[in-house]
Amino acid sequence: MKRAFIFPGQGSQAVGMGKALADNFRTAKAVFDEVDEALSQKLSTLMWEGPAEELTLTANTQPALMAVSLAAMRVLEAEAGLGLREHAAYVAGHSLGEYSALAAAGSLSIADTARLLRIRGNAMQNAVPVGQGAMAALLGLEYDTALEVAREAAQGEVCDAANDNGGAQVVVSGHKAAVERAVTIAQQKGAKRAVMLAVSAPFHCALMQPAADAMREALAGVAVKAPAIPVVANVEAAPITDPDAIRDALVRQVTGTVRWRECVAFMASQGVEAFHEVGSGKVLTGLVKRIAAGATASAIGTPEDVAAFKATLQG
């Protein structure tokens, strides 16, 4: 069976995530300790005890979600005998999850990934003054129609398609007034729902250029290796393995569209039958089921999930 391992992005965080893994597996605890040390912060304590408002700060959320994903991967390797080269065709991640995918595939070290995501979170938060940007989810519109909505709403401001999540779920991002116009226009064009999102900044749009510049500089100083298996990049919706191409894709990803629908569709077209979401939550599991008819999708974020996966791998 052809498998892909996929890694969640912002919005999947929850207080307590990863604690059961750390309590039950030394390999998981070692990942959380490594991230804490890399950031000179007890991020694991914040993850397991809260407060939620502090965990939800972008600069904390991004490395925290990566830590849970990599802890789960290390446990899968140690307990279930998972080897990406033997058992997987691709890895991919949603937005910050692409960093988790790269770390899982050995392209980035865990410590470097944690530091990069801390820089990324701060840079994305600081790129646009609070209150000037916004994001909205347009539900029930196909991607091409959502692009028309964004173009019509811009009116000289920025309104870009930030996420093409699949299942007729597209997120737009940009100047607050333009995004508000997009909500109204989307409803006129037949969207089932169009809602403003409670986010701290307008991610994945042209307003994020200062953050893209910051990531170009940060990535230039980090060792990037060829991954053990191809990474399906958000901005390409295609596999990349060259370290320079990986750096470039991560920079463009900050301002570009997360082409998740196309990423999943590509992997399915290449024969992937089973998608495993590694880390916190089940957001991507739900999206995969809407995009790739006939494929299975499961989430692996707890000791019980690890045991279930081990049984399927050995079965």
Image (spheres, grey):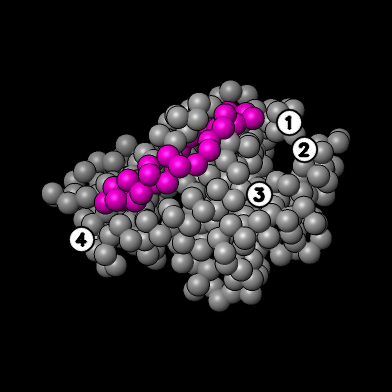
Find out whether the residues at labels 1 and 2 contact each other: C-beta distance under 8 Å. Answer: yes
Find out whether the residues at labels 1 and 4 contact each other: C-beta distance under 8 Å. Answer: no
Find out whether the residues at labels 1 and 3 contact each other: C-beta distance under 8 Å. Answer: no
- Amino acid identity at mark 1: His
For residue 159, say whether it is visible.
Answer: yes
* Residue annotated with mark 4: 177
* Residue annotated with mark 3: 70
Q: Quadrant of the N terminus?
A: top right
Q: Residue furthest front?
A: 221
For residue 140, say whether it is visible.
Answer: no
**Precedes in sequence: disc 1 or disc 2:** 2
Please state the total of marks drawn on the protein image: 4
Residue 242 in the image: x percent, y percent? 50, 26
**Precedes in sequence: disc 3 or disc 4:** 3
**Precedes in sequence: disc 1 or disc 3:** 3
Q: Which residues are magenta?
A: 207-234
- Amino acid identity at mark 3: Leu
Q: Secondary structure at mark 4?
A: helix
